[in-house]
Image (tube, rainbow, N blue to C red):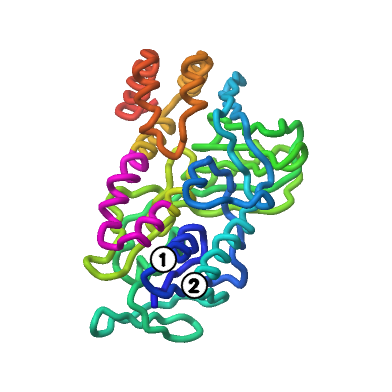
């Protein structure tokens, strides 16, 4: 038996792909997918792992509109359409796939801790009972109780994401707005011409909340979807020594810092763990760590930009050739298009040097 703690995308997808042993998924909430604390917009990278039913797709995004602090804007026509998912139903879909594959789902059952037994076995304790298990997989979010119990929690930093599903004026269907200068990252993701998922994210709660209310304006909130997101930590341990205790998803801090999304990374890592636990860390470091690190450094630079530099960056992306690279690139893997941009646009080097000076000497 394998114990998977958390029925989010990372945990459920891992349980779906795990073929070596019987998986039991323990979810502390009474329903998979709730409460919602995620925007739920995915690139086509997810298609390499699973086919998403059409009834889970709320809307499709064909353009990004980047808006600078002074009001300048540029549209980026996406080469491949992004999908906005019904977030709770997506999680439920993955959990159902896991159950269909033989996993057992335990709802309203909270992980309390574990004890190590002889012969490589563990006794997992929940608020409802105890279970003998050969492996523990922590896919239980930013504050991961598994990571804490195993002593591999490490040093973690978090950002606060303020988000609401709301009635929002003047929406452009199929167009996601990204407002530079509001928080570290902000967005308006339309579901249709009346409803949008609107959010701001950042480390300073007071300032972020102010920016959030500025972005919301007079819109009517339907549902609050705010939450905590971990910053990627390159030194985060993904396994307790040579023991069979592993971390996935937010519990492993596998969140790309540019947009603070982590669904794809959690699913990819879950697939690696299901394939072979002994090569899990090697595969994650080889295939994911570089892009997670690049995203972290890009976020640090973007956080250091002045308003003038944000406008300058927008002007750079107004150029047709630069816009085309941005449109074709997969934002989950910035290493695949960042070099192209740097090779084509000398102004990016100048802008980057200016931002670096901000980091070293202040704005």
The answer, for residue 308, to whether it is visible in the render is no
**Residues drawn in magenta:** 268-293
Q: Is residue 6 visible?
A: yes
Q: Are marks 1 and 2 in contact (CB under 8 Å)?
A: yes
Image coords of residue 339 (percent x, y): 34, 25
Instruction: Estimate the x, y position of residue 7 in percent, counting from the top left.
Output: 51, 65
Residue plotted at (46% across, 45% down): 203
Mark sitting earlier along the chain (1/2): 1
User: How far from the left and from the top, in percent, is residue 22?
Assistant: 42, 75
Picture residue at 34% right of the left edge, 18% below the top? 343
Spatial CA distance of label 1 from label 2 is 9 Å
Does 251 sit above or below residue 1?
above
Is residue 39 depicted above or below 82 in this figure?
below
Q: Main secondary structure of the magenta part?
A: helix
Out of 106 and 297, give the one closest to the viewer.
106
Judge from the rendering whether residue 169 lies leftward or rightward of residue 115; answer left or right: right
Q: Quick one: SS at disc 1?
A: loop
Element type at mark 2: loop
Q: Is residue 275 magenta?
A: yes
In the image, residue 284 above or below residue 101: above
Percent of width and height locating residue 4: 43, 70
Q: Residue tagged by mark 2? A: 103
Say whether residue 192 is left or right of residue 38: right
Which residue, given by chain and number where applicable, does mark 1 sit on?
Answer: 18
Residue at x 46%, y 30% (from the top left corner): 329
Task: Determine whether 6 is above or below 36 in the image.
Answer: below
Quadrant occupied by the N terminus: bottom left
- The circle on residue 172 is none
């Amino acid at each position: 038996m394998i114990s998977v703690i958390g029925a989010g995308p990372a945990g459920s997808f891992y349980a779906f792909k795990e073929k070596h042993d019987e998986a039991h998924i323990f979810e502390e909430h009474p329903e998979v997918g709730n409460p919602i604390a995620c925007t739920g917009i995915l690139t086509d990278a997810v298609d390499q792992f699973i086919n998403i039913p059409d009834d889970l797709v709320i809307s499709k995004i064909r353009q990004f509109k980047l808006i600078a602090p002074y009001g300048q804007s540029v549209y980026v026509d996406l080469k491949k359409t992004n999908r906005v998912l019904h977030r709770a139903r997506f999680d439920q879909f993955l959990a159902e796939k896991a159950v269909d594959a033989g996993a057992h789902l335990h709802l309203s059952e909270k992980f309390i801790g574990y004890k190590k037994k002889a012969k490589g076995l563990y006794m997992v304790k929940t608020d409802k009972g105890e279970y003998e298990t050969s492996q523990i997989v922590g896919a239980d979010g930013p504050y991961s109780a598994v990571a804490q119990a195993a002593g591999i929690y490490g040093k973690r930093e978090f950002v606060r994401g303020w988000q609401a599903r709301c009635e929002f004026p003047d929406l452009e269907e199929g167009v996601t707005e990204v407002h530079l200068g509001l928080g570290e990252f902000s967005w308006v993701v339309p579901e249709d011409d009346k409803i949008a998922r609107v959010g701001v994210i950042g480390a300073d709660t007071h300032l972020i909340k102010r920016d959030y209310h500025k972005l919301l304006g007079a819109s009517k909130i339907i549902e609050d979807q705010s939450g905590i997101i971990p910053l990627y930590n390159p030194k985060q341990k993904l396994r307790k020594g040579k023991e069979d205790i592993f971390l996935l998803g937010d519990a492993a801090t596998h969140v790309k810092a540019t947009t603070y999304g982590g669904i794809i990374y959690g699913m990819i890592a879950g697939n690696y763990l299901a394939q072979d636990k002994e090569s899990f860390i090697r595969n994650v470091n080889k295939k994911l760590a570089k892009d997670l690190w690049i995203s972290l450094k890009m976020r640090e630079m973007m956080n250091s930009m002045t308003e003038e530099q944000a406008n300058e960056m927008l002007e750079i992306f107004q150029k047709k050739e630069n816009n085309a690279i941005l449109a074709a690139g997969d934002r989950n893997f910035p290493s695949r298009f960042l070099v192209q941009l740097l090779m084509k646009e000398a102004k990016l080097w100048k802008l980057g040097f200016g931002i670096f000076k901000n980091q070293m000497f202040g704005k």
